[in-house]
Image (cartoon, rainbow, N blue to C red):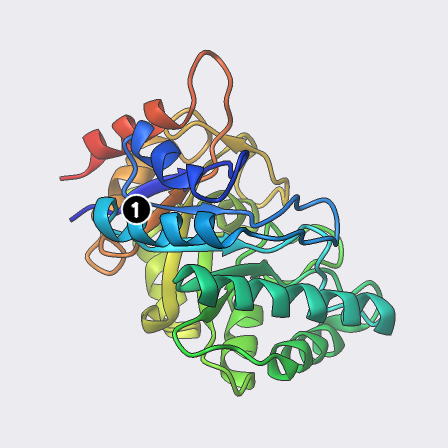
Amino acid sequence: MLRIGAHVSIAGGIDNAVGRQLDIGGNCGQVFTHSPQVWDHGSIEDDAAEQFRDETAAELAGPWVIHSSYLVNLCTPKEGLREKSRDSMQQEVDAADRLDIEYVNVHLGAHTGAGVDGGIENAIGVIDSLDIPDGVKILVESDAGSGTKLGGQFEHLARVVEGTEADVGVCLDTAHTFAAGYDLSTPEGVDETVAEFDDVVGTEHLDCIHLNDSKHDCGTNKDEHAHIGDGYIGDDGFRRILNHPEWRDVPFVLETPTEDGRSYAWNVEHVTALRE
């Protein structure tokens, strides 16, 4: 079964997310638990949490993924920011436990001068300091690799997965991976990227794919998403991604834009048409 969905809003309450996912034709998806621009997590009402759990179990194939705040930086050498990031991540994994959500997705962040080794050590330290509930798993997301941000190279992801005491997985973002220099625009390029990911990280650690086309070419390190098939990856690349035997059963979550009169529903339909 194709598991495809999108990052939907929780405006009005977390319980509204399931209906929004169904409205676009999705059967899995992603949410923020609060505004990603602030540290304040607010609160989730008991009734809303219960309705979310019940409707998810009844209506969706799953899984859901919580995307952490944009402010979180696991790699930072700044102790204050690292502590705020740790506190925010603890609240996210606790919310995931309460909502019966399996995954919490996080960007590694930028090392801002600590170096790759220092940044990875900082990220591992934050993750290992968390009290992660049973049934909840942190996913480290691939990055476009600009500046001092980590996660652009598969090796960065592998070192975190292997270095933590926790059971950590990976969320691969197709636009980020492409921008970081891994060619996904042709069937041959996809096959090579899949093989390299398996060799460096291990396919068994791939738990989610953010499915996004890219408005910029391979290796530019520029992160700007496009509708599926409209960017530099294109339909040929996505057809192979969606049908590759190593990746086809991984849940796909869209973070495509709303522009040109198209939004998530159009992308879900287009992805479904590319699936063989």
Residue located at (22% from left, 33% from top): 272
Front residue (pair 183, 23): 23
Q: Can residue 24 be seen?
A: no
Give the left or right position of residue 168, taking residue 198 as reference: right
Residue 8 location (% of width, % of height):
46, 37
Front residue (pair 84, 189): 84
Residue lying furthest top: 261
Residue located at (29% from left, 42% from top): 4
Q: Amino acid at mark 1?
A: Glu
Residue lying furthest bottom: 165
Quarter of the image holding residue 206? Answer: bottom left
Front residue (pair 262, 57): 57
Quarter of the image holding residue 234? Answer: top left
Residue 45 location (% of width, % of height):
53, 51
Give the left or right position of residue 32, taking residue 228 as reference: right
Give the left or right position of residue 3, taking residue 126 as reference: left
Tell me the crowding category of disc 1: few under 14, some 14 to 19, or many 20 or more residues within 10 angstroms, Cα based. some
Q: Can residue 121 be seen?
A: yes
**Total labels drawn:** 1
Q: Secondary structure at mark 1?
A: helix
Residue designated by label 1: 55
Residue 124 location (% of width, % of height):
63, 79
Residue 52 location (% of width, % of height):
38, 49
Front residue (pair 92, 248): 92
In the rendered view, tell whether residue 75 sits above or below residue 63.
Answer: below
Image quarter hosting the C terminus = top left
Give the left or right position of residue 148, taking residue 196 as reference: right
